[in-house]
């Protein structure tokens, strides 16, 4: 061994080159994930589930890569391993340049996740898997060269790998997407892949030289065998953070706020936990992590159902609880890491855990749950990953605290139920005092349960019991909104709720996707067929319908985005309305009279439906067919940007009659889409008018919302009636760069919206 150390120092690959190679491979892997997701996003309507399913696929591909790396380590000679891996990189390059492979056929609205998996496998599966295998392989080669020569452990390279992943992840939405067209991204990544092959080949040659220069071939190191209990523990500790990452992303984007790029934050924190955990000297010590994690999870469990709480506080608590839980799991993984002889098996188990956690959220949870229950469930189960302590020697104080915490949690929904009835029946004079007592009592009981949970944190089973009961009790206590029904599909969670509106003289049913309202209908027979929210006659959409109806006795109408079917209330005898909707569930909800009756009761003409992504299904419609075409799909967080490109608008205009009108409904709380839309209208060859509508006093029988809209026509004459209305202004196409199929800038739209709200921004 002494001879090996002395000679290998004369010829071995520099340690920095190992770090650079693992860093580069990880950066390529995490650049291609959002890139390829963006390539397929237009084909599936921009659903958040596209990202979750894509993440699950990438975890499966990562497993394939780690399995390949583990199998390759069975080859005794490092030289043979290097030759095989470089050959695999070159073979995988045959799938380049990066593109969406069409062998899977057109997208399916009935089985979108299966179609997406097939497309991803055909398009990027081979390069991604081979790139993913680089990190464990390079670490194994490091252990057999530098590690043996200098006694350094290879696991620290995993921190470099995750640093590359983190920087690439942050660079995509902030630098790559705004700065490069999609074609530039595709060819740029493909070129970078080929450069990486050269880098990998250089490292391989240096490693082979180092091995060849060794005077003595070392004997295989005898390492302790790996037990199945070890493997099972590795898998579970890896599965919990992977599931929580997708769970907290879905919860935040669905129930807290609909904002773009939120998926970046949990994934970045997830990668950061790997960097910290695999450092030689962690920035956060494992013992300190356990204390912080217990406090964060207890508070998060108590606050999780209260979605109306302060926005920043909600974000902070959820992200902190996720970060500390993931860090705890990854630090416990590092504490259980095996001898470097079993390195590839260790990473294989980590990738299996990632697949288990990701697949549960992406494929199982949407089928078995009608809401995002997987998040609180896994958050509670993560408590079992904490140290258990001696179960045969539990001090009496721990039993008392555990029982007290459970009782306080159970008492919370009971107290809420009793006090809610009293507040409802209280006199106007005493209502304030009753409500104050109600909030203080509920918060006091929840706080007591949180404190008890924190005090029994050293006993994982006790901590889990209190957190589990607390999560259930908080959900029961918070459920004070009148949610009548909840549905879930690949495209999201839909909720039907009901509230009393005095101006409408009765109850109003509402349909929401997370925090985004997609329509409402009055239950008062007098106003039942009055379109509400975005669709009242005074809003831009309503103005277009009423003005067009005055000019034409019968119209052919197309509407992209169904919601509650509100625009069906404008359909007269002789009119024909076609809804283009990507989610079959939304059609079932909107056409069920028990939910909404716009389509069945209020429409006087013919109404039909086309299911599928509108960009594709509209291509099947005859040219020059529509008098009015409404594109109403931009109000939620998952903005289908492919419906707002120059190429898309050119397709819409081609389907209009010469005097037809295209309406782009652009209302969005987080993005200012008016600038790109007006630029797109001009670039597509259309004439456009714009309106930012803000409702004044709400008149009797109306329930309106603010609305941004742009109307586009093939010629100026088709807009004459609207141009005469002072509420419409001539479009300004110079506020933003027009979006195209190979260029969108959601970050720019987000900044424009922030700038409008925060006047101090440049």
Image: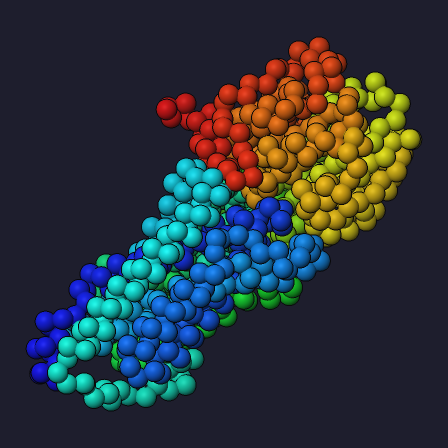
Q: Is residue 638 above or below residue 463?
A: above
**Residue 386 seen in this snapshot:** no
Q: Is residue 326 depicted above or below 265 in this figure?
A: below
Residue at 64% from the left image edge and 65% from the top image edge: 368
Residue at the right extreme, as displayed: 573
Which quadrant, please, contains the N terminus? bottom left
The front one of 216 and 379 is 216
Rendered residue at 65%/16% (across/down) = 728
Image location of residue 695, percent across then percent down? 64, 22
In the picture provided, is 77 more to the left or to the right than 407? Answer: left
Residue at 12 percent across and 83 percent down: it is: 215
508 w.r.t. 758: above or below: below
Quarter of the figure that contains the C terminus = top left
At x 22%, y 77%, the residue is 144
Q: Quadrant of residue 327?
A: bottom left
Q: Is residue 716 above or below residue 264?
A: above
Q: Please provide percent x and percent y for residue 209.
A: 19, 73
Is residue 437 or residue 604 the one in the foreground? 604
Is residue 650 visible in the rendered image? The answer is yes
Across the whole image, how many numbered discs are drawn on residues?
A: 0
């Amino acid at each position: 061994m002494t001879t090996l150390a002395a000679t290998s120092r004369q010829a071995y690959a520099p340690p920095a080159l190992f770090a650079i190679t693992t860093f580069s491979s990880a950066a390529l892997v995490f650049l291609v994930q959002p890139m390829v997701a963006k390539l397929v996003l237009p084909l599936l309507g921009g659903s958040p589930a596209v990202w979750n399913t894509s993440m699950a696929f990438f975890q499966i591909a990562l497993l394939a890569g780690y399995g390949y790396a583990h199998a390759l380590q069975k080859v005794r000679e490092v030289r043979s391993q290097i030759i095989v891996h470089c050959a695999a990189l070159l073979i995988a390059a045959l799938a380049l340049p990066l593109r969406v492979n069409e062998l899977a056929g057109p997208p399916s609205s009935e089985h979108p996740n299966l179609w997406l998996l097939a497309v991803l496998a055909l398009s990027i599966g081979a390069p991604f898997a081979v790139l993913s295998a680089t990190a464990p392989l390079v670490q194994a080669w490091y252990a057999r060269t530098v590690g043996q020569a200098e006694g350094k452990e290879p696991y620290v390279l995993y921190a470099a790998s995750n640093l590359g992943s983190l920087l690439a992840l942050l660079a995509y939405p902030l630098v790559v997407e705004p700065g490069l067209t999609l074609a530039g991204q595709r060819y740029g990544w493909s070129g970078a892949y080929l450069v990486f092959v050269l880098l990998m080949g250089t490292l391989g040659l240096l490693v082979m030289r180092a091995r060849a220069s060794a005077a003595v071939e070392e004997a295989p190191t005898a390492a302790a065998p790996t037990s199945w209990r070890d493997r099972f523990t590795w898998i579970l500790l890896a599965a919990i953070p992977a599931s929580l990452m997708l769970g907290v992303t879905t919860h935040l984007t669905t129930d807290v706020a609909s904002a773009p790029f939120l998926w970046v934050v949990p994934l970045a924190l997830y990668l950061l936990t790997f960097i910290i955990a695999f450092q030689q000297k962690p920035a956060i010590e494992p013992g300190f992590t356990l204390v912080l994690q217990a406090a964060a999870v207890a508070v998060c469990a108590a606050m999780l159902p209260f979605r109306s709480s302060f926005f920043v506080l909600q974000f902070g608590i959820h992200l902190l609880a996720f970060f500390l839980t993931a860090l705890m799991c990854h630090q416990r993984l590092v504490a259980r890491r095996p001898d470097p002889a079993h390195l590839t098996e260790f990473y294989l188990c980590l990738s299996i855990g990632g697949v288990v956690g990701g697949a549960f959220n992406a494929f199982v949870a949407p089928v078995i749950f009608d809401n995002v229950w997987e998040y609180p469930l896994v958050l509670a189960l993560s408590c079992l990953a904490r140290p258990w302590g001696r179960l045969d020697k539990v001090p009496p104080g721990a039993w008392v605290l555990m029982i007290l915490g459970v009782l306080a949690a159970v008492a919370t929904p009971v107290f809420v139920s009793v006090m809610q009835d009293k507040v409802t029946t209280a006199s106007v004079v005493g209502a304030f005092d009753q409500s104050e007592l109600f909030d203080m009592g509920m918060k006091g009981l929840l706080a007591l349960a949180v404190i008890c949970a924190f005090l029994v944190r050293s006993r994982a089973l006790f901590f889990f019991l209190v957190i589990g009961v607390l999560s259930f009790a908080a959900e029961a206590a918070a459920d004070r909104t009148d949610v009548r029904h909840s549905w879930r599909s690949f495209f999201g969670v839909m909720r039907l709720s009901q509230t009393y509106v005095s101006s409408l003289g009765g109850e109003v049913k509402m349909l929401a996707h997370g925090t985004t309202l997609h329509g409402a209908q009055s239950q008062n027979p007098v106003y039942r067929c009055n379109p509400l929210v975005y669709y009242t006659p005074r809003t831009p959409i309503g103005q277009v319908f009423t003005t067009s109806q005055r000019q034409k006795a019968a119209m052919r109408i197309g509407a992209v985005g169904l919601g509650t079917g509100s625009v069906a209330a404008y359909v007269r005898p002789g009119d024909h309305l076609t809804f283009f909707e990507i989610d079959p569930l939304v059609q079932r909800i909107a056409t069920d009279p028990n939910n909404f009756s716009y389509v069945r009761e209020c429409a006087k003409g013919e109404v039909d439906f086309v299911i599928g992504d509108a960009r594709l299904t509209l291509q099947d419609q005859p040219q020059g067919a529509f008098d009015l075409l409404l594109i109403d799909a931009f109000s939620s967080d998952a903005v289908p940007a492919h419906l707002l490109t120059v190429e898309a608008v050119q397709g819409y205009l081609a389907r209009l009659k010469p005097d037809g009108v295209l309406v782009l409904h652009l209302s969005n709380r987080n993005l200012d889409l008016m600038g790109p839309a007006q630029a797109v209208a001009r670039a597509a060859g259309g004439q456009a008018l714009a309106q930012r509508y803000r409702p004044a006093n709400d008149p009797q029988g109306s329930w309106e919302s603010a609305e941004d809209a742009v109307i586009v026509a093939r010629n100026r004459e088709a807009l004459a009636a609207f141009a005469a209305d002072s509420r419409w202004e001539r479009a300004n196409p110079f506020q933003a760069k027009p979006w195209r199929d190979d260029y969108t800038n959601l970050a720019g739209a987000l900044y424009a919206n922030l700038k409008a709200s925060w006047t101090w921004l440049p």
